[in-house]
């Protein structure tokens, strides 16, 4: 790296320290009370993620009432492919944001800037490849996911537009995570809210006024993602932002790519697992649902929408925890790392328990909002009661997996991601329905939740004990 660039970075650091603005936002991660920090970082993320999940719910309500029950089934069929496309952007975003948090905690600003540049290039390359491959093989993929002659047109019309939008959605996801990790949680929240507001404004217009059907919903989503992409790019192009684009920092570096991909591999595999699970669920519902299979797939889409509303809140908590845990781990403040983890687990468990109670008490009201089709309502209520059976323990499992990722423990995070989806849920989906039919598809979900939570608890206990031993050793050496 040339001397003038290094000098400009040093000047920037000096200026930032004098102004005590954005840099102080990052440094407070190691000094402010944990509860206050978690609220400060989580609340904007929760608002943004909840708004996104509310959009998914409302969008399906628009589609169910404006297009029809088969359109909901068609949308559910696109779920595996949508999750898979998002997985790549989430991989880069999660890996980059974790590394940025750790590097800022170590006062390595130059490395954090290099990570930012590599994030953009990686997302552009991967996003283009995913879009091209997805468009070429779209129909065979959807058929493999369980599409019938009745639902394939809806799924195809939706995904063609979503795949094109994927070109800029990857960078929106990745850069929004980095924005949050570099000390701008509220701004990251507003970028998420922007996409939701644009989406909710355009979707009813395109569906009910222009009569574009499910393509209208997809077009609204694509435009919203473009607006979010423009927002985050404008932030990092602004030199007043603490972490921003700089000339010469867009060269791919093997070490940085390796760090990003190794840490981001855990959420990537989790998303791949979710995609594979959605595909297996759809295929199983076709196999065991008989003439009810299309409606059963629609029920799966409704159940996912409802569960996602609460899962997104937990993800918002995880996003708030991530920079706090990453920064303090980098600064060797293990007591603060443990405290933010415990507080996040408590909050997440409250959220998922509340979600379980709501679905248990008001299943008919919830499902009827999506459709007035009697068969779809019946199938959705049954699926909701079985699939959400162990939902209260999901909060602990989600937070714990993310916690290992946040402190750079990539191998453990990957294992926990694999354990719930590949080791427990997928075998359950292949075995349990053989004995219980279509009900067995829904029963496999809570069964895997229990097994994965037990496995996660063992890993957490081991990590906490290790951190306490390291802390005692460090304190003894500095007495």
Image (cartoon, rainbow, N blue to C red):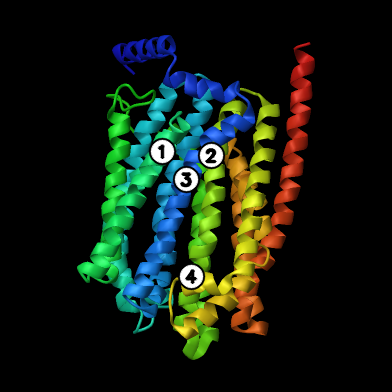
Q: Does residue 194 lie above or below 212 as drawn?
A: above
Disc 4 versus disc 3: distance between alpha carbons? 22 Å
The dot on residue 48 is none
Residue 124 visible in the shown view: no
Q: Are marks 1 and 4 in contact (CB under 8 Å)?
A: no
Disc 1 versus disc 2: distance between alpha carbons? 11 Å
Q: Earlier in the sequence, mark 4 or mark 3?
A: 3
Neighbourhood count class around disc 2 (C-alpha, 10 Å): few under 14, some 14–19, many 20 upward? many
Residue 243 located left or right of residue 418: left
Q: Position of residue 347 (x, y in %)?
A: 64, 45
Q: Which residue is mark 3?
A: 47
Q: Which residue is mark 4?
A: 302
Neighbourhood count class around disc 3 (C-alpha, 10 Å): few under 14, some 14–19, many 20 upward? some
Disc 2 versus disc 3: distance between alpha carbons? 8 Å
Could you tell me how many numbered marks the image carries? Answer: 4
Q: Position of residue 458 (x, y in %)?
A: 75, 48
Q: Earlier in the sequence, mark 2 or mark 3?
A: 2
Q: Which part of the image, by quadrant, shows the N terminus?
A: top left
Q: Which residue is mark 2?
A: 42
Q: Position of residue 147 (x, y in %)?
A: 39, 78
Query: Residue at position x 63%, y 26% from top?
Result: 33
Q: Are marks 4 and 2 in contact (CB under 8 Å)?
A: no
Which numbered mark, 3 or 1, is in the foreground of this view? 3
Residue 234 located left or right of residue 65: left
Q: Which residue is mark 1?
A: 188
Disc 3 versus disc 1: distance between alpha carbons? 10 Å
Disc 1 versus disc 4: distance between alpha carbons? 28 Å
Location of residue 202 (image quadrant): bottom left
Q: Earlier in the sequence, mark 1 or mark 2?
A: 2
Q: Earlier in the sequence, mark 3 or mark 1?
A: 3
Q: Are marks 3 and 1 in contact (CB under 8 Å)?
A: no
Residue farthest toward the left in the current orientation of the protein = 210
């Amino acid at each position: 790296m040339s001397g003038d660039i290094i000098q400009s970075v040093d000047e920037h650091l000096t200026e930032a320290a004098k102004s005590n603005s954005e840099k102080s936002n990052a440094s407070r991660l190691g000094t402010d009370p944990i509860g206050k920090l978690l609220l400060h970082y989580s609340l904007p993320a929760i608002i943004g993620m909840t708004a996104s999940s509310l959009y998914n719910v409302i969008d399906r309500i628009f589609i169910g009432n404006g297009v029809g029950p088969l359109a909901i089934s068609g949308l559910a069929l696109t779920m595996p492919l949508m999750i898979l496309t998002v997985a790549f952007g989430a991989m880069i975003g999660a890996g980059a944001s974790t590394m940025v948090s750790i590097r800022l905690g170590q006062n390595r600003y130059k490395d954090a800037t290099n990570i930012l540049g590599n994030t953009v290039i990686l997302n552009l390359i991967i996003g283009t490849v995913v879009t091209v491959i997805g468009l070429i093989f779209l129909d065979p993929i959807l058929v493999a996911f369980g599409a019938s002659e009745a639902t394939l047109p809806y799924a195809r019309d939706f995904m063609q537009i979503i795949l094109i939008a994927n070109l800029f959605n990857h960078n929106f996801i990745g850069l929004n995570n980095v924005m949050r990790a570099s000390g701008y949680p509220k701004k990251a929240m507003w970028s998420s809210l922007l996409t939701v507001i644009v989406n909710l404004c355009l979707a009813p217009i395109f569906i009910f006024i222009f009569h574009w059907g499910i393509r209208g919903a997809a077009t609204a989503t694509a435009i919203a993602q473009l607006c979010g992409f423009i927002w985050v790019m404008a932030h990092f192009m602004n030199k007043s932002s603490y972490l921003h684009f700089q000339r010469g920092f867009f060269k791919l570096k093997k070490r940085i790519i390796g760090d990003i991909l190794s840490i981001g591999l855990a959420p990537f595999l989790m998303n791949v697992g979710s995609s594979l699970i959605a595909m297996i669920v759809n295929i199983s519902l076709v196999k065991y649902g008989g003439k009810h299979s299309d409606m059963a797939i629609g029920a799966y889409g409704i159940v996912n929408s409802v569960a996602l509303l609460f899962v997104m809140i937990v993800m918002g908590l995880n996003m708030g925890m991530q920079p706090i845990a990453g920064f303090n781990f980098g600064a060797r403040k293990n007591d603060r790392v443990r405290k933010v983890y415990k507080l996040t687990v408590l909050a997440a468990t409250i959220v998922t328990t509340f979600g379980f109670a709501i679905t248990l008490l008001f299943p008919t009201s919830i499902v009827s909002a999506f459709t007035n089709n009697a068969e779809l309502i019946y199938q959705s209520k049954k699926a909701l009661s079985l699939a959400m059976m162990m939902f209260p323990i999901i909060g602990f499992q989600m937070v714990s997996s993310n916690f290992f990722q946040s402190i750079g423990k990539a191998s453990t995070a990957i294992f926990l991601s694999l354990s719930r989806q590949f080791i427990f849920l997928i075998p359950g989906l292949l075995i349990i329905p053989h004995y219980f039919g279509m009900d067995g598809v829904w029963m496999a979900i809570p069964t895997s939740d229990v097994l994965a939570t037990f496995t996660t608890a063992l890993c957490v206990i081991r990590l906490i004990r290790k951190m306490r031993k390291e802390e005692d050793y460090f304190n003894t050496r500095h007495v």
